[in-house]
Image: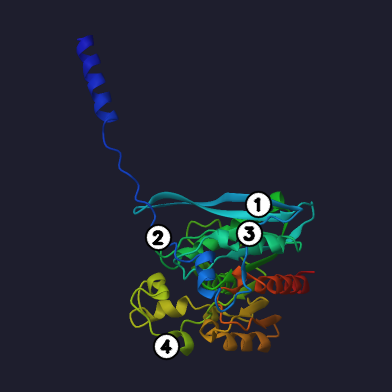
Amino acid sequence: MKKTRFHITMLLAMHLCFQPVLAQTPIPTDTTYNIMRVYRQIKKEFPYAVPVKDSLPAGIRRYIDNIYLELESTAYGKRQLHLDVYRPDNMKKLPAVVLIHGGGWRSGTKDMQVPLAQMLAAKGFVTIPVEYQLSLEAQYPAAVHNIKEAIRWVKANADKFHIDTAKIAISGCSAGGHLASLVGLTNGLAAFETAQSEKAISTDVQAIINFDGVVDFMAPASLNLERKQDAADISWLGGSFESHPALWKEASPIFWADETRIVPMLFFNSGFPRFHAGQDELRGMLKRWNVYHEVHEIDVKVHPFWLFHPWIDGCVDTVASFLNAIFI
């Protein structure tokens, strides 16, 4: 009897061992937006442009791929979101800048913000490039929720990285500029937090820096663009304006601007006006409410100018000056 039980147990164990393991579906990625591809597109017209590089300045510490959020979905299973931290090698409590990459809410990586983060860290700030879910994985508002959780992580770990939590700015480029504006202009609004969020730690920021990011999907210069059905904004928002008008409005940062919550803003504009759709109206609000703001024109037909010298150099100086003006 004992021998029979032993054989049955062994057969069951072997059966379980040889069961096929269901592979987790890989998260789809779009790698079309990268520095070298943009460089190939612009180098003939701008031969003096030099791509930025990951080059850690002397006196700057780097802490890469910190896990700030763990997610699980039925489509892709478990996954982690990461952020990097760069800070001067001292014990001073410093202002921080959270950096959001662009790529049409569909492409790009946090690594594209690393050179800017390093250069700003050399100016005396703690800088944090953030990974977030892109549209092929999760549509709006997932990226907004991700970024707010990243801010919460930064505040929860402020002592470790000597961050002044009363002096946190959010910066973004292109789609990242839109996201930075939406996250910053929804300070304190529970509707933009997930139900699972740890509400004890605020996700409020004290300044917004927008590199060529749209602030109003409803502005004529944005809304009237000719689009294919797989256009970046349609893909991210889950449908066209005609089919989802309320969602397009909800995702437009300008509609959340409020005199009681608005913070200082810095705008960088390229030579492509369509990326500034709605900005004049938002700047009018800032002026009317007497909120500090600056606008700087980068008068070249290069949308991702922040990825190249010489343009990034002046931008870094301007960002540092802006942050010093409001934080020091």
Residue 224: numbered disc: 4
Mark 1 vs mark 2: in front: 2
Q: Is residue 240 above or below residue 26?
A: below
Q: Residues under labels 1 and 2: Cα distance?
A: 28 Å
Q: Which residue is mark 1?
A: 157
Q: Residues under labels 1 and 4: Cα distance?
A: 43 Å
Front in this rendered view, residue 173 or 256: 173
**Which is more N-terminal, label 3 or label 2?**
3
Disc 2 element:
loop
**Which is more N-terminal, label 2 or label 4?**
2
**Which is more N-terminal, label 2 or label 1?**
2
Residues at marks 2 and 3 touching, judged by CB atoms closer than 8 Å: no
Disc 3 element:
strand
Q: Amino acid at mark 4?
A: Asn
Q: Which residue is mark 3?
A: 128
Left or right: residue 142 compared with residue 63? left
Q: Residues under labels 3 and 1: Cα distance?
A: 12 Å
Disc 4 element:
loop
Q: Dot 2: few (<14), some (14–19), or many (≥20) neighbours within 10 Å?
A: some
Residue 137: numbered disc: 2
Q: Which quadrant of the structure image shows residue 292?
A: bottom right
Q: Is residue 277 above or below residue 42?
A: below
**Which is more N-terminal, label 1 or label 3?**
3
Front in this rendered view, residue 236 or 264: 236
Q: Residues under labels 4 and 2: Cα distance?
A: 27 Å
Q: Amino acid at mark 2?
A: Glu
Quadrant for the N terminus, please.
Answer: top left
Disc 1 element:
loop
